[in-house]
Amino acid sequence: MYQKNFKGSWKLLFNNLELFVPDTVFYIVNLIFFVFVLNQLGLVNLLTSSNDLLQSKEALTQFLNSLDPIFFIKSVFYFLIFFMLAFLTGTGTDTAKFYMIRQLFLKKKLSFSDAFSQSARTFYFKLLGLKIVKFIVLIIPIVLIYILLWYIVPAPESFLEALFSKAILLIIALLLSLPFMIFFTLSFYFSEAALFLQKLSIKESLRNSYNFMKNNFLPLIFTILILFGVNLLISLFFNILTKILSPSIVLSTLSFIVVAVVALWGEIFLFSVYSELEKVKR
């Protein structure tokens, strides 16, 4: 099954190049947002001078000392806006992308314009809600364990010691909540595939993904291992290439493109495994 899905996913990807459009739109739009934020903060010159600042400790120190304290408040404000817009935009392009993948697996006509219009109307708020719910569920164990530790461990009187103590407690909370986070990640791994391929609600998608994990635990693990293995090989390849050749913009751009292509293939592969095991009607 995996060999067929592995090859079939690559074939679907390169026979339907329209699938690259949503991610391309996401990268372009967010690049524009990012440049806009830098422009608002007066940091556009950093795009060309950042290497000099990073290579010179004195230049970096001088640059940071020259910044107004209000600048940091503005930075937090603008970057919060940037991440919020990136999240909303990413949800929109993900909706179109998953809708296009859905059309392929349901043997329906693939249309870029239809993907953006139909998917936005049918799936956008469902996917947005699904992402928010998954995020909340993942952080609940961290928050609860952190609060419990905060009440149990006495806080030091010194401000710096108290700050350090809270950081340590957060790290401990992250480590203790790791089993819960792994469990929830596995439980909801196929929730997007369930949402789109079977047009389920948010609650039904989560429940369906959880049942999928219980009934197909080994296929789920194999799917994750295959995706991890492919990404690991790509990472090792470019690490070796970087050591052989000197780092350059061309090499960094090529690495980014390959990683983006593999990520898109991985989503098609994931949909393929779910579609076959759940026997989604085509």
Image (tube, rainbow, N blue to C red):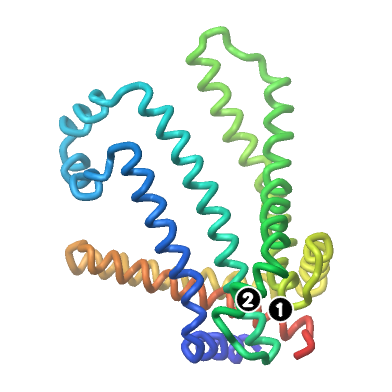
Q: Position of residue 256 (x, y in %)?
A: 36, 67
Of residue 129 and residue 214, the one placed in the foreground of this image is: 129
| Amino acid type of the residue that numbered disc 1 sits on in the rendered structure | Tyr
Q: Position of residue 119 (x, y in %)?
A: 66, 72
Q: Could you tell me if residue 199 is visible in this image? A: yes
Q: Is residue 229 above or below residue 78?
A: below
Q: Could you tell me if residue 222 is visible in this image? A: no
Side of 263 where 143 appears, left or right: right
Report the residue marked by disc 2.
270
Q: Which mark is residue 195?
A: none
Rendered residue at 23%/63% (across/down): 249
Residues at marks 1 and 2, CA–CA distance in whole angstroms: 6 Å
Q: Is residue 98 above or below residue 103?
A: above
| Amino acid type of the residue that numbered disc 2 sits on in the rendered structure | Leu
How many residues crowd around disc 1 within 10 Å: few (fewer than 14), some, or many (20 or more)? many
Contact check, label 1 and label 2, Cβ < 8 Å = yes
Q: Quadrant of residue 281?
A: bottom right
Q: Is residue 126 above or below residue 221?
A: above
Rendered residue at 25%/68% (across/down): 251
* Element class at badge 2: helix
Rendered residue at 38%/57% (across/down): 31
